[in-house]
Structure formats: C-alpha cells, structure tokens
Amino acid sequence: MEIEIEGGSVTRILMGVSESTIKGHPHASISSRGAFDWTIQKIVRHNTSAFKLLFLHVQVPDEDGFDDMDSIYASPEDFKSLMNRDRAKGLHLLEYFVTRCHEIGVSCEAWIKRGDAKEVICHEVKRVQPDLLVVGSRGLGPFQRVFVGTVSEFCVKHAECPVITIKRSADEAPQDPVDD
Amino acid sequence: MEIEIEGGSVTRILMGVSESTIKGHPHASISSRGAFDWTIQKIVRHNTSAFKLLFLHVQVPDEDGFDDMDSIYASPEDFKSLMNRDRAKGLHLLEYFVTRCHEIGVSCEAWIKRGDAKEVICHEVKRVQPDLLVVGSRGLGPFQRVFVGTVSEFCVKHAECPVITIKRSADEAPQDPVDD
C-alpha cells in the first residue's frame, strides 16, 4: 500500500525558540537547542528534503527593557537604539538555527514577533498552520512553574495543531533550574 | 555537517491504541486511526526504514466486564471464555495496525496489557523507553472531559518521553463526541 502524503508536500514543523537567560551566554537557550537537536535526530533524520523547519522567536517587550534599568532615555533615538539592539540579539539567535539547518541541508524560515510568547506562538500556529509545533521546556517542578509560567503547557492546551514538548534533560540543567 | 543519529538506530514511536466505543463498530477507535495516519503521513513519510512503531493496547478489566451484565457465570470456565473473547477483540485491534504497517513497510511490534490505560501507558514508556509517545485524543471540551477522563492529558504530564497528542478532527467526531 502506498503511503498517502498529501500533494507530496513537506512536513512543516514550527519551533518556538528563545535566548538563554544565563548571563554571559548570549545564545540559544538550552531547551531550544535540545528541542532542535531532538527534532533533527528523531524526526527529520536523513530525510531532510521532506521537512521544513519554521523558527519563531518571540521577544517580550517588558523583559527586554529590564536589562536597561540603569540606562537613561533622553530622546526617542535612545529607544530606537534599544529596539535595534534587541532586534540584533533576536537575529543572532535565529542565525544560529538557520545556519545549523543550512549545514544539515533542511530548508527553513525564521522570524521574530513581539508580545507574550505563549499567545504569539498560538497565534502564529493559527496563521501559518504548521503540521507540528515543537517547544522546549525546562522541565520544572510544580513549585518552580508557579513563578515562571510555562509556555509549553499553554501551547499544548491551546495551539491548533499537534504539539511536542521536549523537556530539558536533568544533566543539561544549569545550577538554577529556572535559568535556561 | 553530518546529522548525528545515535548508532544509526531507528526512531521508536510508541502508540497507545484503543477499540471503538461505537456499537457495531468492532474496530480501532477513530482517534487511534487518526493518530496512526498522522504519524505515517507527517513523521514517517517515505522514510519507513528509519522508524519502528510500537502498538500498546490497554484493556480495562472493569469496562470489559460491563458488556456482560446479563451473562451468568457459573464456573471458572465462563470467566475464562470471557477473558478469551476480550483477548480476541484486543488481538483483532492490533492486527489492524500490524497489517497496515506491513503494507506500508514500516517495522512494528504490538502487545496487550490489562489495567488503567493512562497508568499502564506511562509504565510501558518507562519499561520500553521509546523516543516518542503518540496518543489520539477525542478533543473533548472541559465539560465532557470531567466524565470520561483523558488518557492523553495524563500522559503529557507523566510519561518519561516526549508526547504528541493527535486530536480527532471535528468532521470525524461521531454524533456523541464522547464516542470514539
């Protein structure tokens, strides 16, 4: 029996990716890298032409401003340069994943949105209609979750497509498990 | 860059499958068939040699006995024949999926366990350590969920591997959405 694959189209996997929260670690978060590696190793494998990865990075306006508590904003240009710096950080993050896809030979797209991560991700699922959403998770206990919230739990409940949550393995967790 | 796939081993996907609850429909449930079709079309695709599907059917002892309220059990043999009949139904279910895998050319294993579906599935995940657990879901609203419980929600929280829940599409739902 033939495997029926609609119109021979590729499987489009949307991945929500985030920056590391660890100081001096201006790269992809541990859980984002884990989710990416798992997706390549377990799902895409060597069948690279059958998949397309879509990377979405959501920048949270409030949190981004937090680093700049000691900065002085005297003109609209100061805000603009802040926005540009955030944008550069986000682009750097996406560049990491796009470069890895390019090396592996799997096609991809990447973009940045601003807003509340969990809501933006679910909104983008509705808009781009991927076959699958992959989100990394810190794998926190219930007590830690209360304070940081979890994007993954919200997406599992509300995203309009199947969702895989990839938990960070215990040996990858940093000293403070809320970091990522 | 090479895609590192540990030891060239296959991706092992465990699927929890159940019988249809619809009368006169002694086959796989709508959500189980939906989860299987989705997994083949979106994940396995034509890369059949890279995956192995593991089918687990959990028979619930109490529910199985429910059909037999009007039966009279006069000897241990009566129970034995009931057990055998249940076993035959379970084997028929697994035969459906094993036959489809055989036609598609993807390797598989299938087995039956008795007990509470959600607990048995999580226990089997611990025992066989699949790369991924796929469970179908009726996609019920919160009100309907209270009465039927959901295996998928429990597995997403407790299974020690990544989990995908495949919701039944609205146009596949039977007249009573609690049926499957």
Image: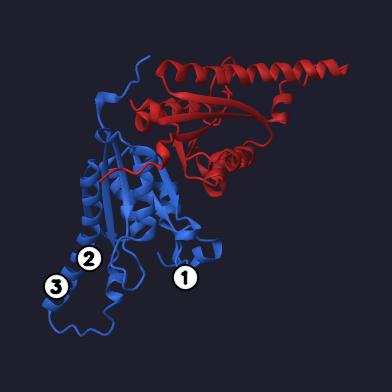
Chain colours: A red, B blue
The answer to whether residue A151 shows anywhere in this view is yes
Local secondary structure at mark 2: helix
Under mark 1, the amino acid is Asp
Q: Percent x, y for residue B139?
A: 49, 57
Q: State the CA–CA distance, disc 1 to disc 2.
A: 23 Å
Under mark 3, the amino acid is Lys
Q: Which mark is residue B80?
A: 3
Task: Compare marks 1 and 3 and give the one earlier in the sequence.
Answer: 3
Local secondary structure at mark 1: loop
Label 1 vs label 3, nearer the camera: 1
Task: Compare marks 1 and 2 and give the one earlier in the sequence.
Answer: 2
Chain ID at mark 1: B
Rendered position, A132 above or below A19 = below
Please count the marks in the image. 3
Whether labels 2 and 3 belong to a single chain: the reply is yes
Rendered position, A157 above or below A179 = below
Residue at (50, 58) in percent of width and height: B170
Under mark 2, the amino acid is Lys
Q: Decide if residue B87 is on the left or right side of residue B135.
A: left
**Residue bearing mark 2:** B89
Residue at (61, 26) in percent of width and height: A111
User: In front: A154, or B22?
Assistant: B22
Q: Percent x, y for residue B108?
A: 22, 44
Q: Percent x, y for residue A180?
A: 53, 27
**Residue bearing mark 1:** B176
Local secondary structure at mark 3: helix
Chain ID at mark 2: B
Label 2 vs label 3, nearer the camera: 2
Residue at (63, 36) in percent of width and height: A117
Q: Quadrant of residue A148?
A: top right
User: In front: B3, or A49?
Assistant: A49
